[in-house]
Image (spheres, rainbow, N blue to C red):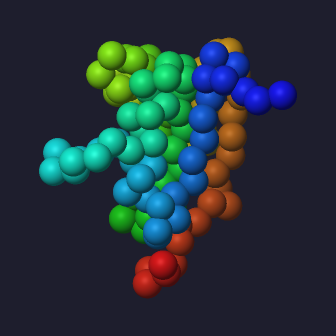
Amino acid sequence: MPLSAEDLALALEVTSPSTAPEDRRPGLRRANPTKWNGYARVGIPFYLLVDRDPGEAQTTLFSEPDTASGSYKESMTWAFGEAIKLPEPFGIEIPTSEWEPWQRGQG
């Protein structure tokens, strides 16, 4: 049975060198929307982005989607090594002590 956006509480993306720009919040000079915009536009309540870029190496939880603008109003960020504490309705903690960024030059 196919899922619809209303069936999802959280979308998760893990960046790779080839997909990172499509997974992140778009920059000011970007003309096209990203997955971040798409998930917000359809109203997925939470978007968890694990950014393995060596320059980032962090996880961000976006919340409070604005379907009209296709953006998230709130976010929380954790560096790799810090435990991710997901709020309710999840209420879980995810250890990241063994997570590593991708190697420079990959992709």
> Which percent across, then down, holds residue 81?
57, 53
Residue at x 15% of width, y 50% of height: 29
Q: Is residue 30 visible?
A: yes
> Which percent across, then down, holds residue 82?
56, 46
> Which percent across, then down, holds residue 67?
39, 17
Q: Residue furthest left?
A: 29
- The one of 62 and 11 positioned closer to us in this rendering: 11
Q: Residue furthest front?
A: 1
> Is 70 placed above or below 19 here?
above
Residue at x 64% of width, y 56% of height: 97
> Is 103 placed above or below 29 here?
below
Which image quadrant: the N terminus? top right
Q: Quadrant of residue 7?
A: top right
- The one of 81 and 106 positioned closer to us in this rendering: 106
> Is 62 placed above or below 73 here?
below
Q: Is residue 81 visible?
A: no
Residue at x 66% of width, y 23% of height: 4
Q: Quadrant of residue 74?
A: top left
Residue at x 67% of width, y 61% of height: 98
> Which percent across, then down, holds residue 56?
39, 58
Number of marks drawn? 0
Q: Quadrant of residue 87?
A: top right
Determine whether, in the image, residue 59 is placed left or right of residue 92: left
Q: Residue furthest bottom?
A: 105
> Is 62 placed above or below 17 here?
above
